[in-house]
Image (spheres, coloured by chain):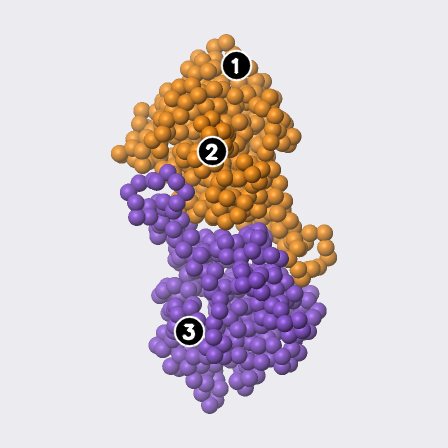
Chain colours: A orange, B purple
């Protein structure tokens, strides 16, 4: 999507970043947004990690899309993550397409968009890039860091890589290791994008073209996985789309078809197809236990961070079992960890919608952490 | 796929068939295959309904693809459906692409392939077409009819539409009504096909072209839904495809990626993309209860057929709840019904693979029905 760069705050990360793939990047832009005020003790800062298709605009109106920020249900004045009390930072991930260094950026060497010449990045690379923001704001230790879905994966990596940089952490509806089904769903999305002739092996930006059909199909697959069977049934069932009976055609007869088409094709205007490839790849490569000889328990060794792990009962993308595995490892590491499975039929998307029990849980956790941290 | 028509048995259905869409078809071909011998009492006949991508070649080697028939695990000499004892009939569904009347057939009026001019068909239309086979073989009443997935949906429709034509029935891993999630997954597949420029609004056969990429993506989505999360994890987990570590590329690093690509691209040589559209549409339109004022209970009123309903514990495409709803309606109708949920982690595909408890269950059911029917 085209946007005015003046709507985007960017930090130029000058410190060289050793990527997992072996390359080194430096002097790259990291786009971010902040909400609320950092107090003078600098002990009220909260970092939010976004999910696959999110960006830095968590709260209020996204100045680019003119739609609500992706976590406006949770972040704002008097909301669960109260921006009157806390200073909230959210960055667009490395590999993203909302102002951070990603595949649609121009390669200074040849003046062309990177496309597939962009390095394959990992969740760890994303997290290392975002640490620079803490240095930028001179925040020694965050009050809290939160993330759902891929945001939760970044958070687990952040805690493992930088054990002293947050007082508390809330990984939500995530996994410490992408399962075969998770990888399969992402590969389906990638194949849909790469099957589109407009993808052109990733080289489409300079042609002012993009694989919109393929990206829309990828997004539709995503949306099916974000909802639960019972949630879909309750929301749509077999309701028809503004017609009394079957049309005996391939138009959208059912509301659920119309919903999917809308979700798919409204997405392509705000998201870069190559970013979708790179970010899903980073998710698939994520296996925190693989980074440590003794696995997940070692990843969390000597954690001082206070954890609250949250899952949703109807989430089939990252089922509760994934969260329980994290809790087991944290407990085995002697960490301070609470766990809550929220009963809901809203599926994986539960953390993005108005789910009162969930919002109350994170609000009270953060507030009580603040009382403890201030002391 | 191109095949020699001499490998295909076809019945020319001359009786006019009133399609649900309002059109009438007649003198159309219905391709079928038989296994075993019909005895002189004509009381050993079994009809098998195939699933979305199946065909008439249930047993032995498929003469077209040269691969094993889709239900060779269950159908054959001394197998669960014993072709030494029983006469097994299986037809390619109306709308299919293995010799039955479908969208790739030539319209005699304009000498062009039907493409999207083929009428939108329903499960009921498929079943009415297949009834002609019973008349052809002069079988008054089948010993048994079986079907898994869409085959089970055809079977439920068959029992409701023709309550006197089978002594027993085994609907497997199916539903009496496609759920919103079922419709969503089919719509995803259709969108993948229609997004492929080679689909050309269904008009590709005469160009000797086909939307292979779109159809492959559709098939990949299907395969994810046919397996369970635990089944995928056990089979593939995070195993790499003939490499020691991540390649940091978009090649198939993981075995599950390689598996999906293979399943997708090997499918396109044997299946017609328009058939995929028409058959998934028929599935989505299927809602047996909608055909009867008093719903499913009325659909099964005065059934003399002996039912065995089977589901699989890890099937998330047609979860056990769908089967239980069928059992509840059958019981409410006073029908003779047994129900078995087979515990397995093989997901929806369980009925196609070697699942001993399942195979033993159908074998003993059919054999005991034969003893009762012979009397």
| Residue topped by disc 3 | B63
Chain of the residue that carries numbered disc 3 in the rendered image: B
Identify the mark at residue A114; answer none if there is no mark.
Answer: 2
In contact (CB < 8 Å): disc 2 and disc 1 = no
Q: Is residue A11 visible?
A: yes
Does residue B330 appear anywhere in the picture?
Answer: no
Percent of width and height locating residue A275: 49, 36
| Mark with earlier residue (2, 1) | 1
Q: Residue at x 47, y 81 (%)?
A: B45
Label 1 sits on residue = A38
Q: Residue at x 48, y 84 (%)?
A: B43
- Above-or-below relation of A87 to B230: above
Question: Are labels 3 and 2 assigned to the same chain?
Answer: no
Residue that sits furthest to the front in the current view: A110
- Label 3 and label 2: CA atoms lie apart by 49 Å
Cα–Cα span, label 2 and label 1? 36 Å
């Amino acid at each position: 999507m085209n946007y005015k760069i003046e709507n985007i705050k960017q930090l130029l990360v000058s410190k060289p970043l050793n990527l997992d793939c072996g390359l080194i990047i430096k002097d790259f832009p990291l786009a971010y947004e902040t909400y609320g005020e950092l107090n003078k003790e600098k002990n009220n800062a909260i970092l939010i990690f976004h999910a696959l298709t999110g960006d830095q605009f968590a709260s209020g109106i996204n100045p680019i899309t003119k739609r609500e920020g992706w976590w406006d249900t949770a972040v704002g004045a008097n909301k669960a993550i109260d921006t009157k009390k806390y200073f909230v930072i959210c960055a667009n991930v490395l590999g993203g397409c909302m102002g951070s260094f990603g595949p649609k950026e121009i390669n200074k060497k040849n003046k062309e968009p990177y496309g597939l010449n962009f390095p394959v990045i990992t969740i760890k690379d994303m997290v290392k890039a975002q640490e620079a923001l803490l240095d930028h704001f001179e925040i020694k230790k965050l009050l809290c860091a939160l993330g759902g879905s891929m945001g939760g994966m970044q958070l687990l990596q952040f805690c493992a890589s930088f054990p002293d940089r947050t007082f508390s952490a809330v990984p939500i509806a995530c996994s410490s290791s992408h399962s075969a089904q998770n990888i399969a769903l992402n590969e389906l999305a990638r194949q849909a994008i790469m099957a589109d002739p407009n993808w052109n092996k990733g080289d489409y930006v300079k042609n002012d073209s993009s694989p919109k059909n393929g990206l829309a199909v990828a997004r539709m697959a995503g949306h099916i996985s974000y909802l639960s069977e019972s949630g879909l049934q309750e929301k749509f069932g077999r309701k028809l789309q503004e017609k009394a009976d079957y049309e005996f055609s391939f138009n959208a007869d059912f509301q659920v078809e119309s919903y999917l088409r809308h979700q798919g094709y409204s997405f392509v205007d705000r998201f870069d197809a190559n970013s979708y490839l790179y970010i899903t790849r980073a998710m698939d490569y994520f296996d925190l236990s693989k980074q440590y000889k003794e696995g997940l328990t070692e990843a969390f060794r000597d954690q001082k961070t206070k954890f609250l792990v949250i899952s949703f009962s109807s989430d089939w993308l990252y089922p509760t079992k994934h969260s329980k595995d994290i809790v087991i490892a944290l407990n085995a590491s002697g960490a301070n960890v609470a766990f809550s499975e929220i009963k809901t039929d809203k599926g994986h998307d539960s953390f993005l919608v108005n789910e009162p029990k969930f919002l109350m849980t994170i609000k009270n956790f953060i507030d009580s952490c603040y009382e403890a941290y201030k002391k």
